[in-house]
Image (cartoon, helix red, strand yellow):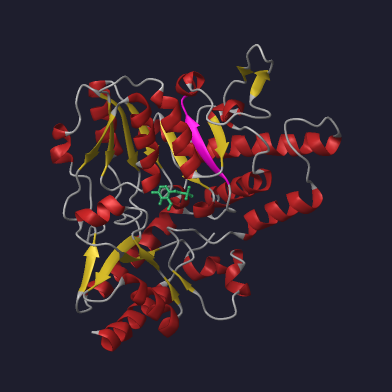
């Protein structure tokens, strides 16, 4: 336990990187924690066998560890049953399974409601599903401070809305979605609520039941696990009705040329050899996350976010895209520097101050269009960030602005 700098010994990158690292690109990927790296190494070097097939002890142990990881992930998100946890390669593949599965329920003219805040992973799969079923994708507009404009919900939610799919936390503005209100709105029209939890998963245990989600997607690499794994959670009644997205080994009940039958969820959606090591590392990361003091970490993140917002607000020509207060937001802050391309900002703050920031459209082109821009810089916080990171960023930006403006 601990906050900020105290946690850095538990993240190997900070000892391995040859110079001070002010890593503020956590919304793109978090650094792996030692517990997850060790679980990956242990599996690959001391316990490696394929899962769900061998009968020798090594294979049995690998299968048991894989299913234990399913239970751990169910605990992390408050899922009623481990079998509702589908292992995927990440949030993107999870959302594709969801969209493909829900497409079955759509008739021509039905509507899928997303928002202008969404990552492309929560837009494009729905566009593909809509195209296949002659359905329509609509989007909830966004306010000037980067939140869902729920006053305008009535203009896009209709009795043809079958699916509402929204991000839990914006990867650009940091705004936290009012899911209680959206659950109620979805219920009013009998729609399924899908939640993209990619940016929420690193911020501590989740309760999918309390949120009222029907399906919930996230990636391991953003929650201090390895790359290559993720989860789609779904209520069993919903997953049971989904067709598989991928066909292959280990997702079938019986294969014949007369016709193939499929395994029950979650295996129906886990064709082929799954990302076993990354899944075990994800479970180790979830254990690590569950062992932290989340009231201390939330207070730490809010304090640093406040310092970041104040620091950015004090610099000439800097525009923040998103809420400038601390209510209902996490530590993801996108900003523009007047007259300077986001890539130049990111390169210079790295060269001048050793700060790793993201610059680009953040896979959110409709949101960029909403804010009349094509790219922004973005700083995003993790538990190991501390005041030194914020100071380095503000100092690096000040010098960047002096040089370029
Ligand atoms: N959804 C959101 C809000 C994200 O921020 C991201 C990644 O940045 C994704 C989905 C996709 O995650 P992945 O690339 O790990 O599949």
Quadrant including the N terminus: bottom right
Q: Say if 359 sits above or below 220 in the image.
A: below
Q: Give the x, y percent position of residue 112.
A: 29, 31
| Residue lying at 27% horizontally and 83% vertically, measured from the top left | 401
Q: Give the x, y percent position of residue 82.
A: 57, 30
| Residue lying at 32% horizontally and 79% vertically, measured from the top left | 397
Give, as a single range, the part of the protein colored magenta: 229-235
Quadrant of the image occupied by residue 206: top left
Quadrant of the image occupied by residue 184: top left
**Residue 234 drawn in magenta:** yes
Quadrant of the image occupied by residue 347: bottom left
Which secondary structure dominates the residues rendered in magenta?
strand
Q: Say if 232 sits above or below 4 in the image.
A: above
| Residue lying at 51% horizontally and 19% vertically, measured from the top left | 240
Residue located farthest toward the right when viewing the structure as drawn: 56
Q: Nearer the viewer, residue 173 or 298?
A: 173
Q: Give the x, y percent position of residue 140.
A: 22, 40
Residue located farthest toward the top when viewing the structure as drawn: 258
Residue located farthest toward the front when viewing the structure as drawn: 257
Q: Judge left or right: residue 401 versus residue 7.
A: left
Can residue 328 be seen by looking at this rendering? Answer: no
């Amino acid at each position: 336990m601990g906050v900020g700098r105290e946690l850095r010994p538990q993240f190997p990158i900070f000892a391995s990187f040859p110079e001070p690292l002010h890593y503020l690109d956590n919304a793109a990927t978090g650094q792996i924690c030692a517990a997850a790296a060790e679980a990956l190494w242990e599996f690959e070097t001391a316990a490696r066998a394929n899962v769900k097939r061998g009968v020798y002890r090594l294979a049995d142990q690998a299968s048991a560890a894989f299913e234990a990881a399913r239970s751990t992930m169910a605990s992390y998100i408050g899922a009623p049953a481990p079998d509702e946890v589908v292992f995927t390669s990440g949030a993107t593949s999870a959302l594709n399974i969801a969209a493909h599965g829900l497409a079955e329920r759509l008739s021509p003219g039905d509507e899928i409601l997303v928002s202008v805040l969404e990552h492309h992973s929560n837009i494009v799969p729905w566009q593909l599903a809509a195209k296949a079923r002659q359905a329509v994708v609509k989007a909830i507009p966004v306010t000037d401070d980067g939140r869902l404009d729920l006053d305008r919900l009535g203009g896009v939610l209709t009795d043809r809305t079958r699916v509402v799919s929204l991000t839990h936390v914006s990867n650009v503005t940091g705004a936290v979605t009012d899911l209680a209100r959206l659950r109620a709105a979805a219920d009013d029209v009998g729609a399924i609520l899908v939640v993209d939890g990619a940016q929420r998963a690193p911020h501590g245990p989740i309760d999918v039941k309390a949120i009222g989600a029907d399906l919930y997607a996230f990636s391991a690499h953003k929650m201090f696990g390895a790359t290559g794994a993720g989860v789609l959670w779904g209520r069993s009644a919903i997953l049971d009705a989904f067709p598989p997205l991928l066909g292959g080994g280990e997702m079938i009940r019986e294969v014949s040329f007369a016709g193939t039958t499929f395994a029950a969820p979650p295996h129906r959606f886990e064709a082929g050899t799954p990302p076993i090591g990354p899944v075990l590392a994800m479970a180790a990361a979830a254990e690590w996350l569950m062992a932290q003091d989340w009231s201390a970490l939330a207070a730490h993140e809010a304090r640093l976010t406040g310092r970041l917002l104040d620091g950015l607000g004090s610099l000439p020509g800097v525009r923040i895209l998103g809420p400038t207060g601390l209510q209902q937001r996490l530590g993801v802050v996108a900003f523009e520097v007047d007259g300077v391309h986001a890539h130049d900002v990111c390169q210079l703050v790295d060269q001048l101050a050793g700060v790793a920031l993201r610059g680009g459209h953040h896979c959110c082109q409709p949101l960029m269009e909403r804010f009349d821009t094509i790219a922004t810089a973005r700083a995003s916080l993790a538990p190991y960030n501390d005041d030194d990171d914020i100071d380095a960023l503000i100092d690096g930006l000040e010098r960047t602005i002096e040089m370029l403006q």
